[in-house]
Image: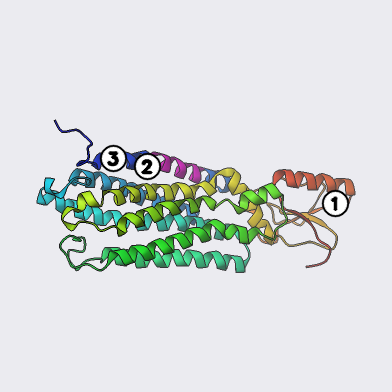
Amino acid sequence: MAPLIDDSHKGPLINLASWLTLVPMVFFVMTKVWTKWNMTKAFQLDDGYMAFGTLIAIAGTVNTDVAVNAGLGQHQSQLTSSQFHTFQITAYLSQICYVITLSFAKMACAQFLITLTRTKNRQNIVTGILGLIGAWLVVSLFCVALQCEYPNTWDTANGKCFNASKFWIANAVVDLTTQTLLAFVPVYLLWNLKMDKKRKRVAMLSFSPNITTAPLTILRLIYILQPATKTDLPFSTFTAAMIMEIHTKYSIIASCIPFLRPLVEALAVGLVTTDVFMPEDGDYAMGSSNNLRTQHKKPQRINPFALRKGSWITMTRDPHARVAAKNMAFKQGVFYFHHHGRK
């Protein structure tokens, strides 16, 4: 009996990697959705993007399983014509799942920043990033779906196809650019904000995990650019397929990390309260979960997601109460400021 895995039968390795990365991916997505729901009691657009990307990633896992059964990781000489036909279709579908999953994972992060950012200029910046991701997704789907002549658009072995290497180079450049923008745009958004330094650092770096997908993007590109033997595609494309499968799942995981509760709270407080306007001269104010202009001697615990533009609480002018309010504000991670003039 032939061994399950050997040098000429590597398929089960990609199956193992695919299912092992699927479990933590689903766990992180469930954690992300639960955290957001627990804080907002609402299913928002970024949740929809993430859910759709996750479903496509799961579909990609099932597709990979079919590809392995069809001969992925084996020499083409070992396959029947029917198996090779199935392999080509699954390879084609895996590329489509790949570009969709990566794009929707990034779109979820961008949409979350738009939800939190209240100033129009800053929203426009993040919206531009979201637009770039969405536009490239359309271009990518068009290129991948029509990479070979119709009707056999999946037949890279025998069909007349465009130079896929140039497309994947462009795709890698766009992916690295958008991931970098998403990783560091919170730094720009929060740079001039006065808030607790520890919370500010956490908020600034909350999307930095996105940049950790860069090595996988580069590594996959390296293997794709290596000459593939068209007469042995199931075997020569195995490593690139393995990296693509891991990259797909990890992109979802990395995009979910900013939604962990401590990061969400720090980021939400930082971005939302940049728009809290000042009350009258000399008043001490902090963001409020209500749109009420009422006097309070003590600050209230704040739900950042409930903040709206113009929300605030005016603090008492009593110096002892001001000190107590400021200490509590920083302890809770709430932006606290002193205004010296009218807005």
**Would residue 131 be seen by someone viewing this image from the given angle?**
yes
Q: Which residue is tagged 1?
A: 316
Q: Which residue is tagged 2?
A: 22
Residue at screen point 52% across, 58% down: 182
SS type, badge 1 = loop
Residue 339: percent from left, percent from top: 81, 61
Residue at screen point 12% across, 45% down: 78
Q: Which residue is tagged 3?
A: 13
How far apart are the two marked residues, 2 and 1, measured between alpha carbons? 53 Å
Where does the N terminus fall, quadrant-wise?
Answer: top left
| Drawn side of residue 70 relative to residue 206, left or right | left
How far apart are the two marked residues, 1 and 3, measured between alpha carbons? 65 Å
Q: Which label sits on residue 203?
A: none
| Drawn side of residue 327 relative to residue 44, left or right | right
Whether the magenta-drawn stretch holds residue 24 is answered as: yes
SS type, badge 3 = helix
